[in-house]
Structures are given as C-alpha cells and as structure tokens.
Image: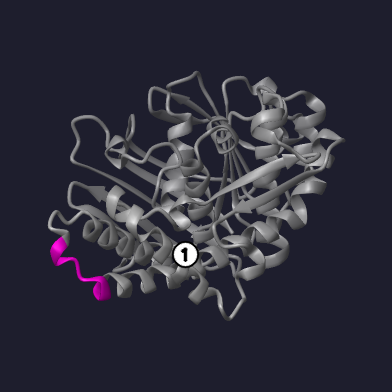
Amino acid sequence: MFLESLKLENFRNISSLNLKFDKKINIFIGNNAQGKTNILESIYFLAITRSHRTNNENNLIKNDCLYTKVSGVYKNDENISNYLSVLFNEKGKKVSVNNIVQKRISNYLSRLNVIMFCPDDLEIVKGSPNVRRRFLNLEISQFRKDYLIHLKEYNQILKQRNEYLKQKNNAKFNRTYFDIITDKLIDKNIEIISLRYAFIDEINDYVGNIFKSISETGNLTIEYKSFIAKKDIENSELKEKLKKRYNSLFTNELLQKTTLLGCHKDDFKMYLNGNDVTDFCSQGQQRLTVLSLKLAELEVFIKSRQIYPIILLDDIFSELDNIKKNNIIKHFNDEVQIFITTTEIEDINDELKNKAEIFNVYNGNVTKEE
C-alpha cells in the first residue's frame, strides 16, 4: 500500500496543505519546530485516528481554530484507491471511508497501516507500563479490528465496576450484581490478554535476529507480563480460577474503591542477553531495542499478514552511525513506502536520497524540490 496524497486543515501549525507523494521515498527537510514531525503525525493520525505524541487531541487543532481535518488517498495492496478522512472538533471525532461516515472507529481501522519510528519511542523502554500498554493497544488494533472492540468494552466494564466500588453507602451493595460485572470483566481480560500474548509471540519470531543484524551482537527477547500466565490462557478452568482471585481481593477493592487486577495493569519487558533493557542497558542499546521492536512489527505485517505498511521515520538517523543506518535500511522492502524527516540532508543515506521526492518545510509551509 502507499499514500498517494494528503490534505491537512488546521493541523498543529499547518493552516492548509495539499501534497502528492512518491510511492517509494519522501524526505522532509527543515529546522526544528517548522512542521516536519506534524506531517508524519498527521499521516499516523489518518491511519490510527490517534496521535503518537499526545493523549490530548485538542493539541492537534491549530491555535484559534475550531477543528482539524486530515484526509488522504491511498492505494491498498490490491492497487485500489481509497479516500480516508478524520475530522476532529469539540463534538468529537468523525471518520469516513470513501465519503461514507463510519459509525464505529473499529470499522475504519486496519485500512491504512503505518509504523512510526521517532525519538520519543525511547519511552517504550524507559517510560511507565502505561506507555507500553498504549503501544500494544495501538499496534494490535492495526492487526485485529476486534481488539479495539474488546478494549473499549473492557474499559466500559472497568469504569462501571470502579464506580460501583466507590458507592458511599456499602450497605446497599448488591454482591450478586457486582459478581455479574466481574464475570464480564474476566471474559474481556481473557480475550485481550490472549491477543497480546499472540502479538508478542509474533514479534519474538523476528526481533532477536533483527537486533543482531543492526548491532551485530546480543540476544533480544520480549516478555509479556500479566496476572494470567501464558500457559493458562487455554486452560478450561481459567475462568473459575480468576473468579477465586477476584473474590480474594474483594475486601481490599472495597477499601481502595478500585479494581486491583486486570489487563489495565499488565506490562511487557525487553531483555538483552537476559538483562532487563530498562535497568541494565545504555541509551544507545535501548534505542536499538526499540528500533528492533518496530522492525519486527514490519516483518509481522509483511511475512505473516502479507501487508506492506507505510514507514514513518521521524529524525531517527541523526544519532546513528553509518553502519547502523545501513543495517536498518536493509530491512525496508522495496514495496514499502517511506516518509523521512531530517534537519540535515547529510544524515540520509545517498541511496535513499537519489530515489526520493524531497520537500522543504518552513513555518508550516511545504515546497517540493524540483
């Protein structure tokens, strides 16, 4: 697949923009804070309907404007053109496919697939478990439409359960009703955690060899950390075991007025030669770990799903030596469309530059080099 064109209205510092792209490589050059990253963010937003940079989507709307709209035409792997748009304002978000409004975002997702590489990705290693869960949720939703549905239902049930635990007058607490809510929460936990384990398994099929191919040393593995063990996912007695665990926490949950167990507290860890990358590795190794994680996702798309996602590279080459740059570039299939931002064109491999359309970005305006 590849993105043929992109149109922006009131997105970040960009008032209006209409661009057509090369189907292979597109490079955006400019100083910091001029809008390069905003363009890649808008492509990510068009595909995922979320930003990779902020949870407060009001930040996407240009100052003193009432809305932002991102739209684009892409060709899928069957070479069929499709029109996508995401409109966001104070009323919320409206997504359309070929000018038909989609009632559920899950019906919109999985059409335009992207993988973003950016400096902030280091937070996947160094940040809180919430950062890693958000990464899992965004990426798995590109592979499985039902994942987003399960997650939304889980969050609704979790909110309902927490609100019930916060009731001031516990004398009226209906334990039977509460247990029904808990049963529903258990079902959603099993569905979500099962999909997360499957995704991590697919990543592990590739991530070790990719790390070695870039750094030329080391064994990298990813491990999902959950209150449900991987070996128990298919156990017919799992649901009854989980009911007992929730029952054992009931008194503490009443006291703390919150749900203490669930996939909303899960995490995943990365290990290099058996050592936790967060605690025992240098920032350079941590950066290569995240790059390897994203490149493994690319392999899952291509080899396991027969999909060629769009690659977004936001200023990732400036801190890498030429050997590592070249080792990374080797992983990009010729069928993959690439978008690159940089402050210095010298940071980009000559082979990539010679194939690319080059755009200059200044103060939210973009001009194409002839």
Q: Quadrant of the N terminus?
A: bottom right
Decide if residue 29 is on the left or right side of residue 7.
right
Quarter of the image for residue 293 reads top right
Q: Is residue 351 above or below residue 243?
A: above
Quadrant where the image shows the C terminus: top right
**86 within the magenta span:** no
- Could you tell me which residue is drawn at 69 percent across and 20 percent down? 346
* Prevailing secondary structure class for the magenta stretch in the rendered image: helix
Q: Residue at x 25, y 57 (%)?
A: 165
Viewer-proximal residue among 365 and 193: 193
Whether residue 145 appears in this view of the structure is no
Q: Dot 1 corresponds to which residue?
A: 245
Identity of the residue drawn at 57% across and 32% down? 126
What span is in magenta? 171-177
Q: Amino acid at mark 1?
A: Arg
Q: How many marks?
A: 1
Name, please, the residue furthest toward the bottom.
236
Q: Residue at x 40, y 58 (%)?
A: 249
